[in-house]
Amino acid sequence: MAPFQIFYLLLSLLVFAVAWMRGGHTERAGVAIFVLAFVASLMVQPLTVNQFRLGEALVDLALCGALVWLALRRDRWWTLAAAAFAGLTMIAHALMFMTPHLEQAHVRMDVASRWGIGVLLILCLAAGVLERWMAGERPASNEARWRRPERPAT
């Protein structure tokens, strides 16, 4: 595993944990979307067409759609930035799809660019949690009920 890939995974795990514990419902939805995309991309990674990573492109398309949906449904700025970065990922996939003769160097550049954009996506989520904290908004975990409400004695 490449050092940047280790950094990417550790950063993602850290941001996901912080966003889940200190973020609001929008940040928790973002964590769920990102984790589903990570798991799905692992499952469809072998799906390629002439060295074009079709499976990853489909997962990134679904991620982009989910982030756009989240941005349109919620009032957080980070969702708009994340959707924009997901759109950049789709542009990278489109450029690779339109390249007539894919070579190994093209594939490596594509993966490296999408990793970089992926880090920016994760940092958007982290910035959303930071903004929530700086604004003094309560995290969703403080509002969560972890037990069933007790029934009043009759």
Image (tube, rainbow, N blue to C red):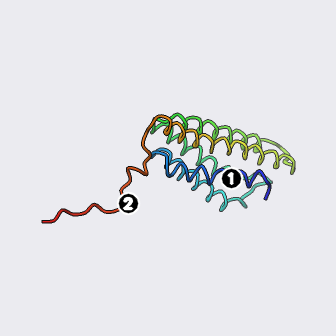
Residue 154 in the figure: left or right of residue 149: left
Q: Residues within 10 Å of mark 1 (few under 14, many from 20)?
A: many
Q: What residue is drawn where x is 77% and y is 50%?
A: 4
Q: Quadrant of the C terminus?
A: bottom left
Give the x, y percent position of residue 11. 66, 50
Q: Quadrant of the N terminus?
A: bottom right
Residue 57 in the figure: left or right of residue 76: right
Residue 56 in the figure: left or right of residue 64: right
- Which disc, if any, is residue 146? 2
Q: Residues within 10 Å of mark 2 (few under 14, many from 20)?
A: few
Give the x, y percent position of residue 37. 60, 53
Q: Is residue 88 above or below residue 7?
A: above
Q: Secondary structure at mark 1?
A: helix
Q: What residue is drawn where x is 70% and y is 53%?
A: 54
Given residues 46 and 109, the one toward you in this image is 109
Kindly give the residue lying farthest to the left in the view shown: 154
Q: Which residue is mark 1?
A: 56
The answer to the question of whether label 2 and label 1 lie on touching residues, with beta carbons closer than 8 A, is no
Given residues 95 and 110, the one toward you in this image is 110
Q: Is residue 150 above or below residue 119?
A: below
The residues tagged by marks 2 and 1 sit, at their Cα atoms, a distance apart of 36 Å
Give the x, y percent position of residue 41. 65, 56
Q: Quadrant of residue 100?
A: top right
- Say which label, 2 or 1, has the lower sequence index: 1
Q: Secondary structure at mark 2?
A: loop
Q: What residue is drawn where x is 62% and y is 54%?
A: 13
Tell me which amino acid carries mark 2.
Trp
Tell me which amino acid carries mark 1.
Glu
Q: What residue is drawn where x is 73% and y is 41%?
A: 92
